[in-house]
Image (spheres, rainbow, N blue to C red):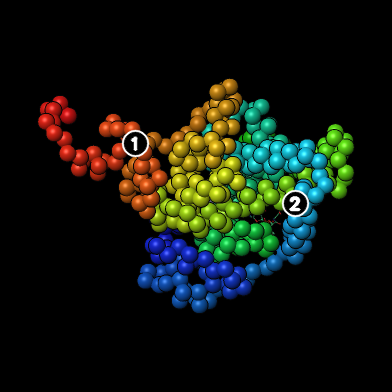
Amino acid sequence: MPPNMTKRPVGAPSALFNEDDSEPSVVDEGNQIAEGETIENNKYKPYRYQRQIVWRNVALFAYLHIAALYGAYLMFASAKIFTSIWAILLYQMSGLGITAGAHRLWAHRSYKAKFPLRVILMIFNTIAFENHIYEWARDHRMHHKYSETNADPHNAKRGFFFSHVGWLLCRKHPEVKEKGRGIDMSDLDHDPVVNFQMTYYLLLMPVLCFLVPTCVPVYIWGESWTNAWFVATMFRYTFTLNMTWLVNSAAHMWGDRPYDKFINPSENIGVALGALGEGWHNYHHVFPWDYKAAELGNYRANLTTGFIDFFSKIGWAYDLKTVSMDMIRKRVDRTGDGSHDHHHSSIWGWEDKELSPEDRQDAVIINRSHEE
Ligand code: ST9
Ligand code: ZN
Ligand code: ZN
């Protein structure tokens, strides 16, 4: 049984989220809740882990968020329209470097990409400054393999704040490091694009995330340094970070669970829109190797899938893995929360594969032919 399938009281997901991070409740050893034990009495068990805050990060993130608020104000107060368009473009490019790059390609291997596409994704990824691809993918593989246990770097059982940003403000739980040693990263060791980014990260990242985004508006359309820095760089970077983090916080709390009601990740359309198609998180945790990271390839709520499909058309992306309708149906029937059909109630008729087996079974067929 995967760790994320342990004893979550069905129908009461929010009971697991302790907003008050000062209480080290469910961060005790192993976080394994014994049979018959509730979360409430489990939290009084002795624990050895002591949270250790990294004040340097607290200061940096505090500055970042204050600067971003100022940037949001300047965006309307004095920035040129091109500066705002540039900020939005950077958000989408860097976002794709995370979603299509670090996430679906490198962490999950849900498709393959030829060298030029990997270079593009690596550049986009560096604009996003969410750590280099290797570190991002390693943390993310841990997040899936040990979901919502102490070995998950942003364990959502430690509350909204911890899974959103708090995990970047303190030392990692020892179990992340212990169990992390066992995670296979050999595929990335052999990717020259990933290695190049890792080697030169401390040079590439400041140039691509901060320098170029700030200089372009100043030198190309005569923006002021203040507007360029606070709008195109501080606001854009902080906004993109928060959109990413919402997948770890909000999409682990709120939304339907049509594929597996026993896990916390959920289908959150708001997050999907902001995170370029990464809010279909119940589906994603059930089928992490699907390149669409969602059941349906609706591009409006899944820009990343459109991006990968485009590169698949020109041959730069290939071996796109996806889940068959039959496999989804079986899973929905076995572990879904019943919200699936409510979302996909539109069927075109009898032969539609979306027609549930129960409906097919129970339908009245008059003058039934003998061939069927
Ligand atoms: C950022 C990342 O924001 C965001 C990631 C979000 C993920 C979202 C996923 C959701 C799905 C995808 C949706 C995408 C949506 C995108 C939408 C876009 C519009 N395994 O880390 P250290 C070992 S970053 C194995 O220093 P500390 C290892 O030996 C923001 N081993 O731990 C390591 O050494 P090395 C910018 C592991 O000291 C050693 O431990 N970046 C693992 O506890 C030390 O590691 C920052 O702000 C593992 N998983 O410090 C930097 N982990 O690396 C923030 C560790 O040499 N980070 N080890 O092998 C830090 O300052 C520190 O990492 C720390 C922890 C203070 C948080
Ligand atoms: Zn997740
Ligand atoms: Zn994932």
At label 1, which amino acid type do we have? Ile
The residue beneath circle 1 is 347
Which label was assigned to residue 101? Answer: none
Q: Is residue 115 left or right of residue 321?
A: right
Q: Position of residue 144 (x, y in %)?
A: 51, 51
Badge 2, how many Cα within 10 Å: few under 14, some, many 20+?
many
The residue beneath circle 2 is 72
Quarter of the N terminus within the rendering: bottom left
Q: Position of residue 228 (x, y in %)?
A: 83, 44
Q: Position of residue 35 (x, y in %)?
A: 37, 69
Q: Considering depth in this image, is 192 or 20 the residue closer to the camera?
A: 20
**Residue 56 appearing in the image:** no
Q: Is residue 349 left or right of residue 340?
A: left
**Residue 14 appearing in the image:** yes
Circle 1 SS class: loop
Instruction: Residue at 55%, 56% (x, y): give it.
Output: 250
At label 2, which amino acid type do we have? Ala
Quarter of the C terminus within the rendering: top left
Q: Is residue 289 left or right of residue 208?
A: left
Q: Position of residue 57 (x, y in %)?
A: 74, 60
Q: Is residue 165 above or below residue 234?
A: below
Q: Is residue 114 above or below residue 75?
A: above
Q: Is residue 81 left or right of residue 352?
A: right
Badge 1, how many Cα within 10 Å: few under 14, some, many 20+?
few
